[in-house]
Amino acid sequence: MPPHIAIAPCRKMPDYVESVRLAGGDPWELGHAADPVETVVSSCAGLLLTGGADVAPERYGEARHSTVVDVDAARDAYEIALVRAALAADLPILAICRGLQVMNVAAGGSLVQDIPSQVGTAVPHQVSDPKDAIAHDVTVVAGSRLAGMMGEAAAGGRLAVNSRHHQSVRRIADGFVVTSVAPDGVIEALELPQARFCVGVQWHPENFVASRTFLPLFAGLVSAARI
């Protein structure tokens, strides 16, 4: 049977769901009220964290920057609890965009609240249309799980990615390692080496569902969930 992959709720689910299906998983679209954290972690074989609103800076002990206006407190609370329970259970996790940020905060890290004002505008991190438009390249660390999954596509140590975010990882949570960065130093991927499978990327691989460019990331999650 295909492994049951829980997908954190968001406003744009179809590409995530189809990516999990194409990778051989059985997608389970979660709801905050309908699916308690304990039930999810005990009932699924893997977890996919999705994109969406800003993570509230209060979650990592900072005052809000003026640009942080799109916050969903209920979603923050649910997903942070979900990540912590999944990490404790060594459940395979693939985290995307906001999902990467939530994972880092849940594990004790912090975020850059606004890239344009706190990092700069030399690299475009907000290219919204079309959703699979290439925004910039990222480096990929040789020998990382990310490099292994992407294979020949990352053979030169680089990947071309899309981008739709104004926040990013700042202080890295204990145990995690950086495996990809943008040309301006913005962190584009984290991994937890001691975990069975725990990878987060800042771009949106699900938007390449038609070309299957980043399907290996979803296949990696599903493969780990089969073990």
Image (spheres, helix red, strand yellow):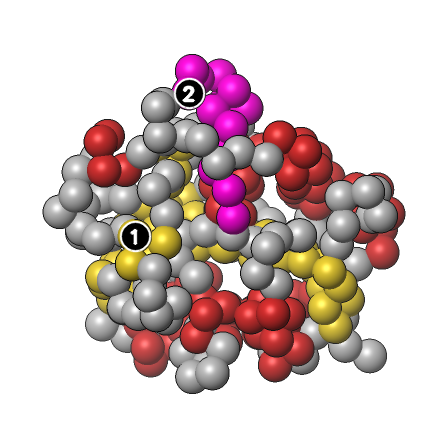
Front-most of residues 168 and 89 = 168
Q: Of residues 156 and 36, which is closer to you in this image? A: 36
Element under disc 1: strand
Q: Position of residue 131 (x, y in %)?
A: 39, 67
In the image, the segment drawn in magenta is 52-64
In this image, 197 relative to 55: left or right?
A: right
Quadrant (top left/top right/bottom left/bottom right) for the N terminus: bottom right
Q: Quadrant of residue 11?
A: bottom right
> What's the mark number on residue 90?
none
Residue shown at the point (36%, 23%) measured from the top left:
65
Q: Main secondary structure of the magenta part?
A: loop
* Residue 137 higher or lower than 168, as above or below: below
Q: Which residue is mark 2?
A: 64
Question: Is 145 covered by the magenta stretch?
Answer: no
Q: Which residue is mark 1?
A: 126
Q: Quadrant of residue 225?
A: bottom right
Q: For the point 46% across and 51% down, which residue is it?
A: 97
Whole-percent x, y for residue 135 in the image: 25, 62
Q: Look at label 2 and name its amino acid.
A: Arg
Residue 57: x %, y % from top left: 47, 24
Query: Does residue 14 appear to the left or right of 140 in the view shown?
Result: right
Task: Judge from the rendering whether residue 116 lies leftward or rightward of residue 47; answer left or right.
Answer: left
x 41%, y 30%: residue: 68
Q: Is residue 192 above or below residue 23?
A: above
Q: Amino acid at mark 1?
A: Gln
Residues marked 1 and 2 touching at CB (< 8 Å)? no
Q: Determine if residue 88 is in view.
A: no
- Percent across and percent down for residue 104 are 50, 37
At 28% from the left and 51% from the top, the residue drawn is: 125
User: Considering the numbered disc 2 on the image, is that residue within a helix, a strand or a loop?
Assistant: loop
Q: Is residue 133 visible?
A: yes
Mark 2, Cα crowd under 10 Å, few <14 / some 14-19 / many 20+, is few
